[in-house]
Image: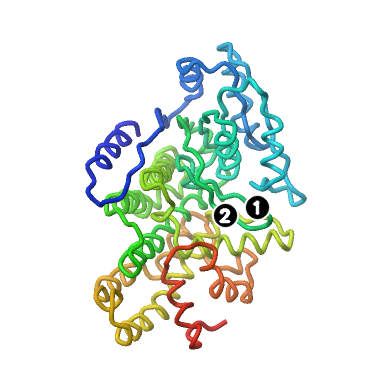
Amino acid sequence: MENDMAELMTLAQNCDCGNHHHPIPIEKILIGNSVYKELAAFVITKGFNHAVIIADENTHQAAGKSLSETLKETGIRVSLSIITPDENNDVVADETSLVQALLEIPVETDVIIAVGAGTLHDIARFCSTKIKVPFISVPTAPSVDGFTSMGAPLIVRGVKTTFQMTAPVAVFADLAVLMAAPRKMVAAGFGDMLAKYTSLADWRFGHLVKGEPYCPLVAAITREALEACAANVEKIAEADEEGIQILIEALIKSGLAMLIFGQSHPASGGEHHLSHYWEMEFLKQKRPAVLHGAKVGVTTVLLAEVYKERFLPLLSESARLQPGKLQENLKEIMKIYQEIPNPEHLKNLLTQTGGETLPEQLGIDEQLVAASLQNAHNLRNRYTALKFMNAAAESSTLIHP
């Protein structure tokens, strides 16, 4: 991965897309077996003396305990912040968890170590930014693509908003730990990668119609990671060392693409907006959380159907009536959305990894699906096909509940 990272940095420096590309501040990415000794050596090299591990009870047992012992053996002081779950036994990146973590970080701390999946990384990323202390990423499941990104999706007053924080200074992913993760988290990671089919289409659409910033290089990096997962779905489904390495490398590469671009556009389109809407509704109802990747896998299937059956016919009619960028780029836009795989193919890919494919399998009823299709586009100031459809629907009934 370090060779890949160096190559990406060189490509980004030479990119002529016109956007400002952010340098990759990550100094080391190590994926392998028994990597925590290398993590301890990295900590010593950096001159860090006091580390705080942010974890939950499960991730502490899976990796935090052994990592803590390894660090202590090398003379590093270690403190723990074990995030308390909510009434549904879910760890949530909300105000309560953020304050808990901040209060449990000693003043003398000089490095934070996130041990867990996406939510714990978001908490650590927030704390790292606010107290100006670097953090190290230790994934315990190949479940999300946000390990290396700057974005931290946080729940603030019940609303999920992504804040640009900081990236880790290093990533140490132990394959044995990742292989031991629950299979549903492997399926979630695959679902998060599959979502790039619709996010990449929406990103290009926003650029062509509204001039939103776009980078072909970053899009290509993201698509390469996506295609690696789709081509190796059988290996990923087996959850053996090879399959898990393919998945975690793809997730990390997707995160690096976001990091270079400075925003989540490459990996987050209408499918993520639907997922965030569902998540906020679950929070309001105090229902147990559903894994992020499980939701976006399902919303990708849903949008593949909506885009092909409703958006494409609407697109042609709108372009005829509205001269401008939409009409000028109609042929390319049509091709972009036609190339999204059919819903049945996406369902087959998700099913192979044990992932859900329908909203009802996640406890999402028809009313919530309808409400999200009509309102989720308002969660982000980002021009997606979903936002286009709803703008058109203000004077028509093309999107049905």
Q: Which mark is residue 161?
A: 2
- Left or right of 236? Residue 82 is right
Labels in figure, total: 2
Q: Position of residue 280 (x, y in %)?
A: 64, 61
Q: Which mark is residue 156?
A: 1
* Colouring chosen for the image of the structure: rainbow
Q: Quadrant of the N terminus?
A: top left
Cβ–Cβ under 8 Å for marks 1 and 2:
yes
Which corner quadrant of the image does residue 369 belong to? bottom right
Q: Which mark is residue 126?
A: none
Please, is residue 391 above or below residue 227 in the view? below
Disc 2, SS: strand
Q: Position of residue 149 (x, y in %)?
A: 45, 43
The type of residue carrying mark 2 is Thr
Q: What is the crowding at mark 1: few (fewer than 14 residues within 10 Å), some, or many (at least 20)?
A: few
Q: Quadrant of the C terminus?
A: bottom right
- Left or right of 337? Residue 372 is right
Label 1 and label 2: CA atoms lie apart by 7 Å
Q: Position of residue 63 (x, y in %)?
A: 59, 30
Identify the residue at horizontal 57%, vertical 71% (top origin): 372
Q: What is the crowding at mark 2: few (fewer than 14 residues within 10 Å), some, or many (at least 20)?
A: some
Q: Position of residue 385 (x, y in %)?
A: 41, 71
- Left or right of 176? Residue 309 is left
The type of residue carrying mark 1 is Val
Identify the residue at horizontal 51%, vertical 87% (top origin): 397
